[in-house]
């Protein structure tokens, strides 16, 4: 199982997630701020569908998820980590 590392950001509603298990995407950047944006990227679509997620930023080296002000990280993060772990396991075969 890939290890995920979380880091706080200056915004208390955002968390940066990194891993040594490989890139989250091959290259570029995916920024998702709406369900319409999420439709264009499978990983982004899964993350944005988590109840309480407001924004998702995906780069090869890290993912930053931002929650709504009323969402609780204790409820959001287990699902986000589950999605990212499954994604990385699928990518590495």
Image: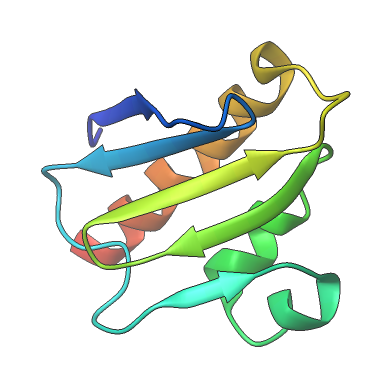
* Image coordinates for residue 5, horizontal then vertical, percent: 27, 27
Q: Residue at x 33, y 26 (%)?
A: 7
* Image coordinates for residue 12, horizontal then vertical, percent: 58, 24
Whether residue 93 can be seen here: no
Residue 43 position by quadrant: bottom right
Residue 18 position by quadrant: top left
Whether 48 is drawn above or below 40: the answer is: above
Q: Is residue 78 left or right of residue 19?
A: right
Viewer-closest of 64 and 23: 64
Q: Residue at x 57, y 38 (%)?
A: 80
**Residue furthest to the top:** 74
Viewer-closest of 45 and 92: 45
Please name the colour scheme applied to the rendered image.
rainbow
Residue 25 position by quadrant: bottom left
**Residue furthest to the right:** 70
Q: Residue at x 81, y 70 (%)?
A: 34
Whether 69 is drawn above or below 21: the answer is: above
Whether 37 is drawn above or below 76: the answer is: below
Q: Is residue 47 left or right of residue 10?
A: right
Quarter holding the N terminus is top left
* Image coordinates for residue 90, horizontal then vertical, percent: 34, 61
Viewer-closest of 11 and 42: 11
Quarter holding the C terminus is bottom left
Q: How many marks?
A: 0
Whether 82 is drawn above or below 74: the answer is: below
């Amino acid at each position: 199982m890939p290890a995920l590392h979380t880091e706080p950001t200056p915004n208390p509603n955002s968390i940066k997630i990194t891993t040594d298990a490989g890139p989250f995407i091959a290259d570029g950047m995916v920024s998702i701020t709406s369900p319409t944006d999420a439709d264009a990227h499978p990983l982004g679509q899964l993350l944005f569908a988590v109840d309480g997620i407001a924004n998702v930023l995906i780069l090869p080296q890290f993912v930053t998820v931002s929650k709504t002000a009323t969402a609780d990280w204790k409820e959001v993060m287990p699902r986000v980590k589950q999605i990212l772990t499954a994604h990385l396991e699928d990518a590495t075969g």
